[in-house]
Image (tube, grey):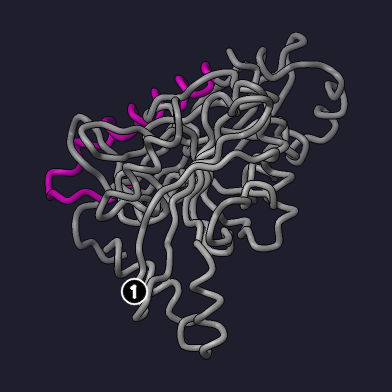
Amino acid sequence: MKKIMPFIILIPLVFTGCSRAKELESRSFVVSAGINNGDFKKYKLSLGLITPLKDNLFNSKETSVESNEPIIDEKSQIGNSKSFYLGHLKTAILGTDILENGEIGKFLSCARSNPNINVKTIITSYDGDCDSLIKSMTQSENSLYLWDYYQNNVAFPENEKTDIERITREIDQFGSTVIPIVKQSDGKIYVSGAYIYKNALCGQLDENELKGLMFLKGYYDKCELSTEKGEFYIKSQKSKYGFYEKDGKIYVNVKIKIDAQANTADYKDCHDSILNVAQNDTKSCIEKLQKADADAAGILYRMKNENPKLYEKYLNMNIFSNMIFDIDTEVKISGPNVIE
């Protein structure tokens, strides 16, 4: 897989003429990048590369460079025999030191100003030196691209991943966001939970609480949900909000609708197990977000659209952490091979 995927990505470029082939040979294609704070107010960039070789072959390797910016600049290229090209960047991994220092804004600014970087580049985080993670990814047969990990894992929804475009939008609209956490264990790379970010790292969601965030956003669909009664496929999921004021407090009614399918005929007794997971994960997520005072679910943004008068009344007040939530979950469940 490691050797096939780079070939698929770059094959359109290989057969565009000899001059293009020579240009390819002078470049190293960055497919993953880890960013940490380095020495002397510089950044340490750990890069997962695909380097063209002779006879249309490609080699995966890892290197580290220093840069004045949290993305490759011209000075970081000095001393390298090949230039770094970011047009095939798939994943950027931000070290927790970047999050703790509130430097996401600088990274996003640099990334968006580079015309070669795709706004759909996946953003993740890592607690430690990203160099070790990039090395593991480069040596792995299947994990060079984290987007491939997301695509082939039905244990969580595709919308659990985030990218440059989404983080930029959520910070602009919500004032905060969450960034999935990459972990290593026994040589395996996986994603579990997320850091809460509001101007700086301010909290953490575990994997269940991250699922709760997906329920709040209405994103938990086309994937599996684990319960005490087994695995269920969530065909669709939506969330509807209502806001009202009582005794000087803001109440939020969240109606979560879930359409699930079981893989067993004994599915009628499974209704409550799905409902309980959704309720518990959502409530736990809200508690974490309120404790961090980070509205990463966009509750106030929804309030602005659903009840603009109430929103305007409390516009200049910090009300999110004191909102009172009522979670109402509705589950529709069917058996296997049911035609509707």
| Residue 293 place in picture, x, y as percent | 65, 17
Q: Which residue is situated farthest in the bottom direction here?
A: 17
Relative to 149, 321 lies left or right? right
- Location of residue 148 in the rendering, given as x and y in whole percent from the top left corner: 36, 56
The residue where tag 1 is placed is 57
Tell me which amino acid carries mark 1.
Answer: Leu
* Residue 291 drawn at (x, y percent): 58, 13
Quick check: 97 left or right of 106? left
In the rendered view, would you say 64 is above or below 288? below
**In the image: residue 103, left or right of residue 32:** right
Residue for point 65% across, 22% down: 101
* Closer-to-camera residue (176/14): 14
In the image, the segment drawn in magenta is 260-288
Screen quadrant of the C terminus: bottom left
Residue that appears at 65% across and 63% down: 116
Question: Is residue 120 one of those drawn in magenta?
Answer: no
- Give the answer, above or below, for where 50 lies relative to 39: below
